[in-house]
Image: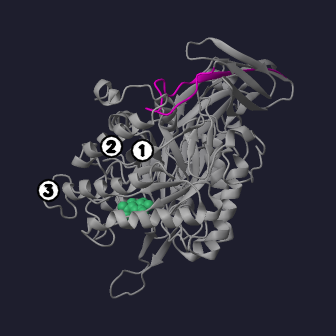
Amino acid sequence: MARGSAVAWAALGPLLWGCALGLQGGMLYPQESPSRECKELDGLWSFRADFSDNRRRGFEEQWYRRPLWESGPTMDMPVPSSFNDISQDWRLRHFVGWVWYEREVILPERWTQDLRTRVVLRIGSAHSYAIVWVNGVDTLEHEGGYLPFEADISNLVQVGPLPSRLRITIAINNTLTPTTLPPGTIQYLTDTSKYPKGYFVQNTYFDFFNYAGLQRSVLLYTTPTTYIDDITVTTSVEQDSGLVNYQISVKGSNLFKLEVRLLDAENKVVANGTGTQGQLKVPGVSLWWPYLMHERPAYLYSLEVQLTAQTSLGPVSDFYTLPVGIRTVAVTKSQFLINGKPFYFHGVNKHEDADIRGKGFDWPLLVKDFNLLRWLGANAFRTSHYPYAEEVMQMCDRYGIVVIDECPGVGLALPQFFNNVSLHHHMQVMEEVVRRDKNHPAVVMWSVANEPASHLESAGYYLKMVIAHTKALDPSRPVTFVSNSNYAADKGAPYVDVICLNSYYSWYHDYGHLELIQLQLATQFENWYKKYQKPIIQSEYGAETIAGFHQDPPLMFTEEYQKSLLEQYHLGLDQKRRKYVVGELIWNFADFMTEQSPTRVLGNKKGIFTRQRQPKSAAFLLRERYWKIANETRYPHSVAKSQCLENSPFT
Ligand code: GCB
C-alpha cells in the first residue's frame, strides 16, 4: 500500500476475516437477552496454594476430584482479585506455581432440564495458565492471562434428573517461561552456602508486579443450542451516510434466519438487513467522536441481531445486541485521522492496579478512573502492557476515550524469547485480542509489544510476522509496537503504521539535567521522522515522584521535578505537534506496584495520581495542557475557546 496517501483502514472492509491460526468460535461479551441468562460467580471462592516442593501435590492427590477442603486447609479468596495482597502470609504474596480455586453453584432447573439450552462457563481471565474441572471432569485449559476463555458445559450439567449442584475447580499457574507472554525465566540458585536446596526465583523483564489469580469475573451463561456465535462489524463513511458492514457466525444448525436492525440512541430503527453478512446504510449519520473532539462525542448505535432456527427439538430464537460506533481511522505520513480529521492523542498509560485487589477488576475503581480521565481532559490511553477488562473497553466506547490496545507482549528483552514457539503463541494471543476487542469503536490501533529488544535481527523478523498477522486479522486498524530502541538500530519500525516512542530524558540518564530535554527530544523526533516518514506518538515519558516530596529548585523524586520535567517535554512536543507528532501519553496515570528493587519505593511512582488516585501537582499542570490542546483541536472549531474548562461539568 502506498505510503504518503491517507491509508483508510475502514474502507478496506473485512477482507481477511477468519484467517486465524486455530481459534474456535467467537468471544461475544456475555449479556442477558430474551434468549440468554447470566449467573455471575463473583464473591468468595475456596482457595489453596500448593506449597509442596514441586508444586504438584494438587495433581498427584487429584484435588479436583473432591471438595477442596478435603485435601487440606483452604482460605476464602475474593473473585475477582489477585491473590497476592489478600492474606498476611508473605509466601502467598510471592508465590510462584499452582494455586487452586473452587466454588459450588446451584443451577436453575431450566438450565439443566431444557435440552435446547446451552450452558457456558466463562472465565474473564486467569493469569497465566489455567485448567478447569467441572464436577471433577477436565473441561478446559487456557494459556495466557488477561483474556477470556470459555467452554460449553451443557453435557456436564444436563445428565438426568436434577444434578443442579456444580463444583467448579480452577488450577492456575503464574509461572512465566521463555515461551509465555509476557515471558520470564525461572532461575535455580544452587550455591548451598546461600540458598536452601531447590531454591528458585521467578525473573521477569517488565516493570509491574506479576499479580495473578482470577482477576476478572467468572460466570455461567446460557444461549439456545443454535446461537449467535460471533458478530464482526466495521464501519465507513460515504458523504453524510454511515456504512456498517456486519458479518455474523451462527453455530448449532444450518437451518436458520437472521434479522438485523440498527437502532439510534433514541431507539429508533435506522437500518435493517437479513442474513449472515451485509451492509447497513445510515443516512445523516451521527459519528462516534473521541471525547472533547466534538460537541457530541461517543455516539453509539445498537445492532440488534435476531436468530430463529429449527432444531431437532423444535424452534429456537437467539437475541444479541452489540453497541456500534460509526467512525473511520486513517493514517497519513504525518497525521492520525479519525473521521477524516487530525486526531491528537493527549492521554495516559495505565495499569490495572490498586491496593489490596492488585489487578482484580473493581467497579468503583473503574468509574473513579474514568472520572479522573475526564477531569484531566485525557482523550486516550494505551492498555500498557496487556489487554484490560472488557468492562474497561466498554467504558471507553461510552465515554469516547480512544484506546491503543496492547497485548501482553511486554518484557521481550532476551534473544531467546524470539523463538518459533513464542512467535506462534504471540500470533495466537493477537487473535484472541482482536477477536475480543474488534468491535470497539474506541480501539483505533493495536500494539503488539512494548519495548521488545527490537535492535536484534531475530526481533525484526518476529515483529514483522506478528504485525503482518494482526493486519491480516483486522485490516480496519493500524498496527504498532512501542519502541525504546535507537532509530538507527530498530528492526521493527519498518512494519508499523505509527511510530510509538518511549524516552526518559533527564530521568534514566543525565539525572537532574532538565535543560537537556528539549534538545534530546528534538533529536529523537527528527531522526525517526527523517528515516521513516510516519506519524510519531511519544508513548511514554515521566519521572518518579513521591507525593508530598517538595524541593525548589527541583530535585529528582519531588513533585517540582516531575512538573518541570513535564514542562520541558511539553515545550519539545509543541515544536513538532503540528508537524508529525500525533500524540503524547504520560507515564503513568497512577502509581503502581512492581517487584521489589533498590530503584522502586513501594512500586513505580511515576503516576500523576497516587495509587489511591489523589493528584500530585503534575496532574494540575497536565490538566491545563490537555484542555488547552482539546480546545485547539476540537471539531468543528466554532466551539468557543476555554468553554471546556469553564463550563465543563467535570471541573
Ligand atoms: C518503560 C516501560 C514501563 C516502565 C517505565 C518506567 O519504558 O515501558 O513498563 O514502567 O519505563 O517507569 O521505567
Q: Nearer the viewer, residue 436 or 551?
A: 551
Residue 197 coordinates in the image, percent (x, y): 41, 81
Q: Which mark is residue 346?
A: 1
Q: CA distance from mark 3 to mark 2?
A: 22 Å
Question: Label 3 belongs to which residue?
Answer: 550
Q: Amino acid at mark 2?
A: Arg
Residue 550 coordinates in the image, percent (x, y): 14, 56
Disc 2, SS: helix
Determine the residue positioned at 59% across, 31% down.
30
Q: Nearer the viewer, mark 2 or mark 1?
A: 2
Disc 1, SS: strand
Location of residue 280 (image quadrant): top right
- Crowdedness of circle 3 by 10 Å Cα count: few (<14), some, many (20+)? some
Question: Label 2 belongs to which residue?
Answer: 625
Pick whichever of labels 1 and 3 is earlier in the sequence. 1
Q: Magenta includes 141?
A: no
Determine the residue positioned at 29% across, 54% down.
567
Asked if 146 appears above or below 262 in the picture, the reply is below
Pick whichever of labels 2 and 1 is earlier in the sequence. 1
- Crowdedness of circle 1 by 10 Å Cα count: few (<14), some, many (20+)? many
Q: Are marks 2 and 1 in contact (CB under 8 Å)?
A: yes
Residue 63 coordinates in the image, percent (x, y): 53, 53
